[in-house]
Amino acid sequence: MCWVALDRATRLGRDRGRNELADSWETEANAVQAEILEHGVSDRGVFRQHYETDALDASLLLMPLVRFLRPDDERVRATVLAIADELTEHGLVLRYRVDETEDGLTGKEGTFTICSFWLVSALSEIGERKRARQLCQRVLSHATPLGLYAEEIEALSGAQLGNFPQAFTHLALINAVSHVISDEQKGERDEPSAVFTEMRAAGAAG
């Protein structure tokens, strides 16, 4: 997020003709990016939660979405697929593994709905369009009759847990569905958008 702030400040500076400030911010953004690329990647080429661990963290799914690196970068692709395969329960995404992270909390957490929608968008970005569509349909199936989502979903039962409704979750939902519909409009499927149909059905039910 430090890189994002500096990168966006650089763009704003250029847009407003503040090139001296923009040059300074761009230099800092490049330095932050270089440090992360040097210390933030594990031996298997996957981004890590922080420098002292090889644990995964779902926030890494934002890397292709905020354009930290291109989606076709092998480190980005490896990270997204590692999270999809290793940081999920019944297909839905955990924030992180609680037994690998010292966050001061105990017990078991549900899967984080926003993280599952992040994964939809990230899979779409790296070209895994079929997996993105399937996961999007899966998460959409857990909506309440009003089409709303809580902070977490208990992956096995589908029960909504935590804050409800959570605005951040719905922002990620919009982005995820937009990615999938865009993929389908590019010719990935010939039939009407199944995701759009799913959303429309949920709205009608509400």
Image (tube, rainbow, N blue to C red):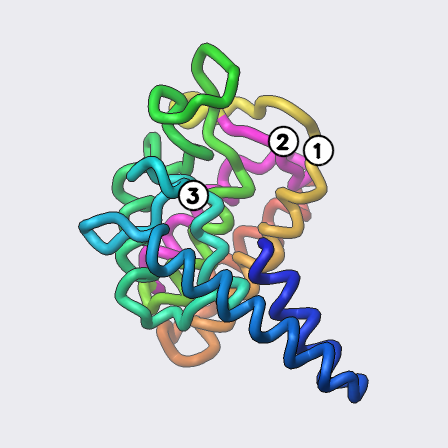
State the residue position of label 2: 150
Quick check: is 145 in the magenta stretch?
yes
Asked which quadrant contains residue 26, the reply is bottom right
Please tell me whether mark 1 or mark 3 is closer to you in this view. Answer: 1
Going 80% across and 84% down the picture, which residue do you hit? 16
State the residue position of label 3: 138
The earlier-in-sequence mark between 2 and 3 is: 3
Mark 2, secondary structure of its residue: loop
**What kind of residue is marked 1?**
Pro
Residue 165's disc number: 1
The earlier-in-sequence mark between 1 and 3 is: 3
- Provide the residue span drawn in magenta: 129-153
**What kind of residue is marked 2?**
Ala
Residue 55, position as x, y percentages in the image: 32, 36
Mark 3 neighbour density, 10 Å: few (under 14) some (14–19) many (20 or more): some
Residue 95's disc number: none
Residue 204, position as x, y percentages in the image: 67, 47
